[in-house]
Image: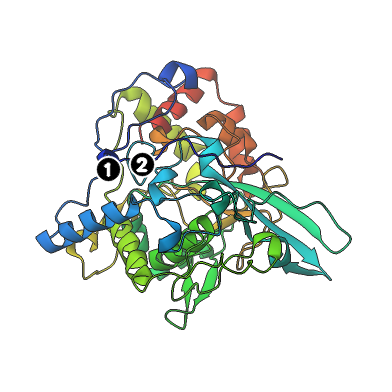
């Protein structure tokens, strides 16, 4: 299999404030004609001057190209966060699967799940410092072959958008857990991916990542800094081992003392990043699509709104969050199962993907296999089977209305 990442460009200083959207035209995607009505990539409204300054500093760090001297490598997938998070604006989803799709591996050994660190897991980094110094003995990693020692699963993962994630973090855990107790006529039964957070020493409800494997943006940031750029930090102190082998002498990169400050800066930027607004107006077709979305029970998982609790940041306190997700993991059927286990999430379970900002997405589902909303719906199985089948039975006029509703988000 070819590498999942290639270098296409160096982020220039001019891209710090806005990255040009690079999604397909409406005609190519089969989307209804539209005009962008919301500027993405801005800070939450209502921030203090100090918070706005912290957001700007975080944005700059998020866009900074890392170097070997700053801890990059020896294996990595990107040299800057914004390299993969830039659809619509910095902080968005990926715009190119050759850049913004990575490989996660895992396997079963003696009946127990393993991250396969001896094969370079759980994430295979496609690039190495050899790009900058040909004397580097380390290459990027490819998916290992099956062996008698492990049943190996490989899962491609695309970059998720970060708009509004601070609001998601501010939703009380009990609000999320309450959804696990619903009595759904279709048998939908989401599960909270509860994890021990070593930073707090407490069990917390996961809400970030394709399997809700992270409970906080700080953990999400530190994990990405390590697995996507190879940079260690306080709570992620161990370097990735290329192909599971020790790093050759002289190529083990040691982070500067300010690495933890970098993780804090990334966290602040994401926490204060504004959510996406509606793209299309509430036309009669969009309103009919929203009614149908509820009628075929897509809202069993994609619940329209949650609310944040009290928060020391006023812009995050007691706010409506129209994310269209319950943040739980659900069994999605054999077609989408990837075998990868993360925390309590099993190989066929995935977080309900938030639909706000769906109009700015170029690819859908965890591996980007769907090029449009309808393809994504048809790949649903497991707990979503009944809703998917109701969609397939709709008349084309009604399907178009439902698509228009999702494209309005």
Q: Give the CA distance from mark 2 to mark 1.
A: 7 Å
Q: Is residue 171 visible from the viewing direction of this image? A: no
Horizontal and vertical percent position of residue 118: 72, 66
Q: Is residue 142 visible from the viewing direction of this image? A: yes
Point out the image quarter for the N terminus: top right
Secondary structure under tag 2 reads: loop
Q: Nearer the viewer, residue 157 or 137?
A: 137
Q: Nearer the viewer, residue 250 or 41?
A: 250
Binning the other alpha carbons within 10 Å of mark 1 as few (below 14), some (14 to 19) or many (20 upward) gives few
Q: Is residue 177 above or below residue 235?
A: above
Q: Is residue 147 above or below residue 239?
A: above
Point out the image quarter for the C terminus: top left
Horizontal and vertical percent position of residue 252: 55, 68
Q: Residue at x 23, y 57 (%)?
A: 57
Q: Residue at x 89, y 60 (%)?
A: 148
Q: Residue at x 50, y 66 (%)?
A: 253
Q: Nearer the viewer, residue 164 or 185?
A: 164
Secondary structure under tag 1 reads: helix
> Which image quadrant is residue 401 in?
top left
Residue pointed to by mark 2: 11
Horizontal and vertical percent position of residue 72: 47, 59
């Amino acid at each position: 299999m070819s590498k999942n990442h290639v270098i296409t460009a160096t982020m220039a200083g001019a891209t710090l404030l806005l990255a040009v959207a690079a999604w397909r035209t409406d005609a190519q995607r089969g989307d209804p004609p539209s005009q962008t009505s919301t500027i993405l990539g801005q800070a939450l409204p209502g921030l203090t001057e100090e918070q706005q300054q912290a957001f700007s500093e975080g944005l700059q760090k998020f866009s900074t190209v890392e170097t070997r001297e700053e801890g990059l490598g020896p294996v990595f997938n990107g040299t800057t966060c914004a390299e993969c998070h830039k659809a619509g604006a910095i902080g968005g989803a990926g715009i190119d699967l050759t850049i913004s799709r990575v490989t996660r591996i895992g396997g079963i050994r003696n009946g127990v799940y393993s991250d396969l660190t001896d094969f370079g897991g759980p994430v295979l980094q496609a690039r190495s410092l050899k790009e900058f110094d040909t004397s580097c003995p380390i290459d990027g990693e490819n998916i290992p072959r099956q062996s008698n020692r492990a049943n190996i699963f490989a899962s491609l993962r695309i970059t998720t958008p970060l708009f509004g994630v601070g609001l998601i973090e501010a939703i009380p855990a009990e609000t999320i857990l309450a959804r696990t107790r619903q009595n759904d006529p279709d048998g939908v039964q989401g599960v909270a991916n509860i994890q021990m957070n070593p930073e707090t020493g407490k069990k917390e409800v996961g809400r970030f990542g394709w399997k809700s494997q992270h409970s906080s943006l700080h953990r999400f940031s530190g994990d990405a800094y390590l697995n996507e750029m190879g940079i260690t930090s306080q709570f992620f102190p161990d370097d990735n081992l290329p192909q599971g082998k020790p790093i050759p002498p002289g190529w083990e990169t040691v982070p500067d003392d300010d690495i933890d400050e970098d993780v804090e800066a990334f966290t602040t930027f994401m926490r204060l990043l504004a959510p996406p607004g509606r793209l299309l107006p509430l036309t009669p077709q969009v309103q009919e699509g929203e009614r149908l979305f509820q009628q075929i029970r897509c809202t069993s998982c994609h619940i329209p709104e949650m609310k944040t609790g009290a928060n020391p940041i006023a812009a995050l306190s007691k706010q409506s969050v129209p994310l269209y997700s319950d943040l739980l993991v659900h069994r999605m059927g054999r077609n989408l199962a990837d075998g990868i286990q993360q925390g309590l999430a099993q190989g066929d379970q995935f977080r309900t993907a938030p639909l706000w900002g769906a109009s700015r997405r170029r690819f859908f589902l965890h591996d980007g296999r769907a090029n449009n909303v309808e393809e994504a719906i048809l790949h649903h199985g497991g707990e979503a089977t009944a809703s998917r089948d109701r969609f397939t039975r709709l008349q084309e006029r009604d399907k178009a209305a439902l698509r228009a509703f999702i494209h309005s988000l």
